[in-house]
Image (cartoon, rainbow, N blue to C red):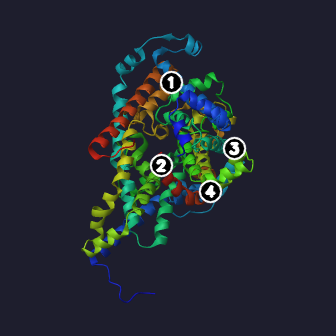
C-alpha cells in the first residue's frame, strides 16, 4: 500500500466521497444503476415493513393509513392459528436440519470413496440433475406417482395393501416434503463438501494405511474431522434458515386437508395478505418471521464462535 | 498395465467398497427413476397409463399428448413469455451485476466498502412478501413485463461472486490500458467482460434456470393470463387441486381433467431446455460454488 492510499483510508466518509468525485468519478457513475435497482426493489419495500404497525388500507396508502402500534402483533399472538403455524414452521425446519442437512455429507463421503473416476463423474451428474427441475414439476411428478392410480399405490396393491391418499393425509406430508427436498438438493449440496474433501492432504491417508487403518475408519479419523469447518459453516446457515422453510413448495403441496401439519408462517402470510387482503396483519406476521430468523442466525453464530471457535463472521 | 507387486486391499476394505457401490447404485436409481417414469408415461398409450401398466418402459406409442400441448394456444403463449422473461431477465442481471461489481473490485475506489455494505444488508433483511407486493403496487409494476425481470436483476450474492472474480484479474492490465488512454468504462467493457466469460456464464445460466423455473413472482405479481409464464400453466395442469380456485376457468379446456400422458408431456416440453443447458452449466458451477464459499 502506498502512502497516499494509506492516508486516504483514514479519511472520513465525506472526504472519501470528495476524493472519488475528483479521481474516480467513473466508478461512482458505474455504481449508480445498481444502486437504483437495489433502492427500488430491496430498500423501498423495506420501508413497507412499517405497515405492520398500521391498519393498512390500499386506498389510503401508507401515508394515510392509521397507526395502531402493536395491535397487529397482538392479534397474531391471539390468533387461533398462531400455535399451529409456528409449530409447523419449527417442526419442518427441525426435520429439515435432521435429515436434509446430513444427507449431502453422507453422499459426499460415499462419492469420495469411489475409485473409478468415470463412474464417479456419472454418479455426480445423476445426483445434480434434479436440482434443475422446477418445484412445480417436482410436485407435479409426486402428485402423479403418489396418486390413486400412481406407481406407488400400484406397488402397494401388489402386496395387498389398501391404497393411500398420500396428498390428503396429514401423516405423510412431512415425509414427502423432506424426502423430495433431499431428492432435489442432495447432489447439489454435496459439491461444497466434495470440494472440502479434495483439499485434504493425501499423505494423511497414506500414513493411516500404513498404520493399518481401514477405509471405513479413515472416514471418521481423517475425512470427517477435515471437513469440520465446512460442516460448521453450513450448519450455522442451516440453523439460520430454520424458520424460512421453502414455502413455495408447500404452497403447491398442501390442501385444506393437510393444513394442520403443512401450514407454516409464510403460507399463512400469503393467504392472509393475498386472499383476505389483510395487509397490515400479514406484514406483522412476516416481520415476526424475519426477526425470529435473524435471531436464530445470530445465536447460531454466537454459540458456534463460543464453543467451536468457528463462525460466519 | 497391472502392477504385479501391487498389494491387494484388505478384505475389510473390499467389503466396504462393495457396500459403497451398492448404496450409490440405489441412489442413482432413485435419482433417475422419476425422469424415466415421466418420459415413459408421456409417450405411452393413455389407455395403458390409465390401466396402471406403465412403470418403467413405455407401453404402446402415442404422440397425441405432445401434439395437444404444442398446438395449444395457451401453452404457446406461455412458452413465448417464458423465453422472453428468461432472455431479458438474464441479460439485465448480467449487466447490473457486472457494472456494480466492477467498481467494487477496485482498491482505489474509496466508497467501495460503504456501497458493499448497502448490498450486504439485503442478504439478511428484506421487506417480506406483503410489503414488497405493496411497494410494487405503488410503483405500478403489478401485471407488467418488468416485474418479472427487474426485481431479481441484482442480488448481493451475485455481486460478491463477480467481484471476487474481477479481483483476480491483474491490475496491471487496466493500468496499461489506462496509459493507452482507455476510460474505466472502456476497460470494463473491453477487458474485464471478455476475460470474465466463466463467471458470466455461471451467473447467467443460473439466473436463466431460476427465471425459467420460477412461478412464485408470477403468482404474486401477475393476474393476466396472457402474461403467464410456463410454470403457471404447468401449475394449473399438474396441480389442479391447488388452493387457488381463481385461475381454473382460464384454461378450462387445457386443465379439464388432463390425462397423465398430457401432464407428463407438458413436463417434458417445458423442462427440456433446462436439461439441454445443464451439461454446459455443470462444468462451471462446481468452480463457482467454491469461489462463493470463500468468504468476503
In the image, residue A185 sits, relative to residue A21, either above or below, namely below
Q: Residues within 10 Å of mark 4 (few under 14, many from 20)?
A: some
Determine the residue positioned at 41% across, 58% down.
A196
Depth check, mark 4 against mark 1: the one in front is 4
Which tag, 2 or 1, sits closer to the chain's start?
2
Q: Nearer the viewer, residue B39 or A220?
A: A220
In this figure, which residue is indicated by the disc labeled 4? B277
Marks 3 and 2, how far apart at CA = 52 Å
Determine the residue positioned at 58% across, 12% down.
A60
In the image, residue A301 sits, relative to residue B45, either above or below, namely above
Q: Is residue A161 left or right of residue B53?
A: left
Q: Nearer the viewer, residue A243 or B196?
A: B196
In this figure, which residue is indicated by the disc labeled 3? B184
Q: Nearer the viewer, residue B253 or A59?
A: A59
Marks 4 and 1, how far apart at CA = 37 Å
Marks 4 and 3, how far apart at CA = 33 Å
Find residue B241 and report its horizontal and vertical position in percent: 51, 38
Which tag, 4 or 3, sits closer to the chain's start?
3
Find residue B127 and report its horizontal and vertical position in percent: 51, 28
Q: Are marks 4 and 2 in contact (CB under 8 Å)?
A: no
Q: Element at badge 2? A: helix
Find residue A120 and report its horizontal and vertical position in percent: 46, 68
Find residue A142 and name its label.
2
In this figure, which residue is indicated by the disc labeled 1? A273
Q: Label 4 marks which chain's residue? A: B
Q: Is residue A105 left or right of residue B236?
A: left
Q: Element at badge 4? A: helix
Q: Residues within 10 Å of mark 2 (few under 14, many from 20)?
A: many
Amino acid at each position: 500500500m502506498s502512502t497516499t492510499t494509506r492516508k486516504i483510508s483514514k479519511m472520513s466518509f465525506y472526504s472519501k466521497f470528495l476524493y472519488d468525485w475528483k479521481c474516480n468519478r467513473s466508478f461512482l457513475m458505474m455504481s449508480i444503476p445498481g444502486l437504483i435497482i437495489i433502492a427500488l426493489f430491496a430498500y423501498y419495500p423495506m420501508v413497507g415493513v412499517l405497515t405492520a404497525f398500521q391498519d393498512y388500507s390500499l386506498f389510503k396508502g401508507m401515508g394515510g393509513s392509521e397507526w395502531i402500534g402493536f395491535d397487529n402483533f397482538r392479534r397474531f399472538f391471539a390468533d387461533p392459528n398462531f400455535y399451529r403455524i409456528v409449530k409447523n414452521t419449527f417442526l419442518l425446519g427441525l426435520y429439515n436440519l435432521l435429515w436434509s442437512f446430513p444427507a449431502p455429507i453422507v453422499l459426499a463421503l460415499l462419492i469420495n470413496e469411489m475409485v473409478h473416476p468415470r463412474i464417479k463423474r456419472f454418479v455426480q451428474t445423476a445426483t445434480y440433475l434434479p436440482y434443475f427441475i422446477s418445484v412445480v414439476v417436482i410436485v407435479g411428478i409426486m402428485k402423479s406417482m403418489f396418486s390413486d392410480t400412481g406407481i406407488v399405490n400400484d406397488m402397494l396393491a401388489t402386496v395387498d395393501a389398501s391404497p393411500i391418499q398420500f396428498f390428503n393425509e396429514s401423516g405423510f406430508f412431512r415425509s414427502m416434503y423432506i424426502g423430495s427436498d433431499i431428492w432435489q438438493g442432495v447432489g447439489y449440496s454435496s459439491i461444497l463438501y466434495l470440494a472440502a474433501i479434495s483439499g485434504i492432504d493425501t499423505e494423511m491417508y497414506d500414513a493411516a494405511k500404513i498404520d493399518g487403518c481401514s477405509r471405513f475408519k479413515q472416514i471418521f479419523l481423517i475425512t470427517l474431522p477435515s471437513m469440520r469447518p465446512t460442516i460448521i459453516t453450513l450448519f450455522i446457515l442451516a440453523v439460520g434458515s430454520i424458520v424460512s422453510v421453502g414455502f413455495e413448495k408447500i404452497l403447491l403441496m398442501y390442501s385444506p386437508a393437510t393444513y394442520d401439519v403443512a401450514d407454516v408462517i409464510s403460507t399463512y402470510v400469503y393467504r392472509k395478505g393475498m386472499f383476505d387482503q389483510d395487509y397490515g396483519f400479514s406484514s406483522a406476521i412476516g416481520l415476526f418471521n424475519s426477526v425470529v430468523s435473524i435471531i436464530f442466525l445470530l445465536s447460531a453464530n454466537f454459540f458456534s464462535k463460543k464453543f467451536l471457535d468457528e463462525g460466519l463472521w | 498395465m497391472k502392477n504385479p507387486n501391487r498389494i491387494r486391499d484388505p478384505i475389510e476394505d473390499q467389503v466396504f467398497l462393495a457396500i459403497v457401490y451398492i448404496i450409490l447404485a440405489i441412489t442413482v436409481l432413485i435419482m433417475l427413476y422419476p425422469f424415466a417414469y415421466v418420459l415413459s408415461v408421456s409417450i405411452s398409450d393413455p389407455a395403458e397409463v390409465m390401466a396402471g401398466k406403465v412403470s418403467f418402459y413405455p407401453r404402446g406409442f402415442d404422440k397425441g399428448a405432445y401434439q395437444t400441448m404444442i398446438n395449444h394456444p395457451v401453452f404457446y403463449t406461455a412458452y413465448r413469455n417464458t423465453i422472453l422473461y428468461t432472455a431479458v431477465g438474464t441479460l439485465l442481471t448480467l449487466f447490473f451485476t457486472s457494472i456494480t461489481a466492477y467498481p467494487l473490485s477496485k482498491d482505489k475506489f474509496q466508497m467501495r466498502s460503504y456501497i458493499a455494505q448497502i448490498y450486504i444488508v439485503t442478504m439478511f433483511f428484506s421487506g417480506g412478501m406483503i410489503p414488497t407486493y405493496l411497494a410494487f403496487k405503488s410503483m405500478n409494476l403489478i401485471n407488467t413485463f418488468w416485474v418479472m425481470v427487474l426485481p431479481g436483476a441484482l442480488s448481493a450474492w451475485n455481486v460478491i461472486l463477480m467481484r471476487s472474480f474481477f479481483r483476480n484479474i491483474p491490475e496491471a492490465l487496466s493500468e496499461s490500458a489506462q496509459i493507452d488512454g482507455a476510460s474505466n468504462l472502456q476497460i470494463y467493457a473491453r477487458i474485464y467482460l471478455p476475460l470474465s466469460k466463466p463467471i458470466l456464464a455461471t451467473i447467467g445460466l443460473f439466473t436463466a434456470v431460476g427465471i425459467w423455473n420460477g412461478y412464485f413472482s408470477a403468482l404474486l405479481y401477475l393476474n393476466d393470463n396472457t402474461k403467464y409464464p410456463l410454470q403457471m400453466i404447468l401449475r394449473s395442469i399438474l396441480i389442479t387441486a391447488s388452493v387457488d380456485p381463481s385461475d381454473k376457468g382460464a384454461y378450462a379446456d387445457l386443465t379439464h381433467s388432463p390425462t397423465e400422458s398430457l401432464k407428463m408431456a407438458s413436463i417434458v416440453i417445458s423442462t427440456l431446455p433446462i436439461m439441454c443447458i445443464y451439461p454446459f452449466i455443470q462444468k462451471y458451477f462446481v468452480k463457482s460454488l467454491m469461489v462463493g464459499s470463500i468468504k468476503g
